[in-house]
Amino acid sequence: MSAAVEVRRDTRSGRGADTTALLGSLVAAIALTGLLFDQIAPFSGVVGFVVIAYPVFLALYALLLSLGEDGLAVRDRLASVVVSSLAVVAGLALAAIIAYPVIEGWDPLWLGNFYTEDMSNAGPLDPIEVGGILHAAVGTLWQITIALAVTVPLGLTCALFLNETRGAFTRLVRTIVEAMTALPSIVAGLFIFASLVLSLGVERSGLAAGCAISVMMLPIMIRAADVVIRLVPSSLREASLALGAGQLRTAWHVVLPTARSGLTTSVLLATARGVGETSPVLITAGYTQYLNWDPTVDAQVSLPLATFTLVSSSEPSMQERGFGAAAVLIVLVLVLFGLARLIGGRAPGAPARRLTRRKA
C-alpha cells in the first residue's frame, strides 16, 4: 500500500484569492455594521463602529477562507490579518503623534524669527512674528550634550563590567540598574537638586539639568548595551585571549568594535529618553525667556519645557509657538538619530573601512 503524498502547503502572502476574500470581507463588514447602526440599533460613534465592524470582518474573512482552506490555513491567515492590523494601528498612531504638532504649529515653522529670536521681547498678546525658540533649542543642545558626556562612558563601562565579571557585586549592580529603569523623572530631578544644588552649592543651570537627564539616560544605556555585548560570540573573546591579549585589550579591541552598531542603538535609546524630559529641567534649571549660552550659570530652558509652558498658555499665539517647538524637537531628534546611525558603523557582515583600504 503506497504512502500518501503530502501536498506542500502554500505559505505565500498576498495571493489573489486571499486579497479578494480580504477586500470582500472588509466591504461586507462595513456594510453590515452601517446597517446595524442606521436601521437596527441606536448606536453611534466612530469608536463603536470600529469595535463592532472589526470582529464582523474577522468572522466573514474566516468564513470565506474556510470554503477553500483547512482549519490550519484559516487560523494562519487570521493571525496574519490580526498582526497586520495591529501594525497598521501602531503606524497610524505614530503618524498622528508626529503630524498633530506639525499641523498645529505649521505657521511659526515658516517664520525666520522663530529660529533666530528668544521670547524676551514677546508678550502673551504679541503675534507669532515676534519671538522664537532659539533659547530653548540652545538649552536642549547643551543639556543633552552634557548628559551624553556623562552617560556614554559610564554606561559603556558599567555594561562591560556586568559582562566581563561575575560575583555578588555584579548581581547587585544589575539589580540596581533594572530598578532604575522605572525611576520617575521628577525623582531624578529632586536627587540632582538635593545633591548638587543644595549640598554642593551648584547654581541652578543647564549643567545641573544635564546631570539630571543623565540619571534618566544611564539605566537605559546600560541595559541596552548589556544586551548588545552579550550577543558578541564568546569564540571571539577566547581567540583574543588565546593569542595573548589581556581582558582589557580584548574588551577594547574585540568586544566593543564588534558590538559598535548595537551600542549606537543603545545611545539612541538613551538619547530618546533624555531629550524629552521636562520635570528634571524645570527643577534643576528653571524656566527663562532669555537666551543663555553658558550652561554653568543662570536658568536655561529646553525645548520640552518650553513646549509645555507655551502650550499651557490660554493665548492662541503662544499655543502655536508651543506646537512649533514640539515639531522642531521631533525634527531635531530625527536628525540626531540619522547622524548617529550614519556614524554608527558598518552593516553586519560588511568589512571595516580600514580593512578595505588595506586590501586596496
Image (tube, rainbow, N blue to C red):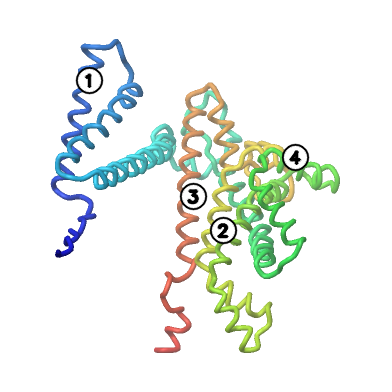
Q: Amino acid at mark 4?
A: Leu
Question: According to the image, label 2 marks what residue?
Answer: 267
Q: Earlier in the sequence, mark 1 or mark 4?
A: 1
Question: According to the image, label 3 marks what residue?
Answer: 332
Q: x, y (%) of residue 161? A: 69, 66
Q: Residue at x 68, y 65 (%)?
A: 157
- In space, the residues marked 1 and 4 are separated at their CA atoms by 54 Å
Q: Earlier in the sequence, mark 2 or mark 3?
A: 2
Q: Earlier in the sequence, mark 3 or mark 1?
A: 1
Question: According to the image, label 1 marks what residue?
Answer: 34
Q: Amino acid at mark 3?
A: Leu
Q: x, y (%) of residue 290? A: 63, 39
Mark 3 against mark 1, which lies toward the viewer? 1
Q: In the picture provided, is 98 more to the left or to the right than 181?
A: left
Give whichever of 220, 83 is nearer the camera. 83
Q: Earlier in the sequence, mark 1 or mark 2?
A: 1
Toward which corner of the image does residue 289 lie, by quadrant? top right
Q: Callout 3: few (<14), some (14-19), or many (20+) C-alpha neighbours within 10 Å?
A: some
Return the mark for residue 190: 4
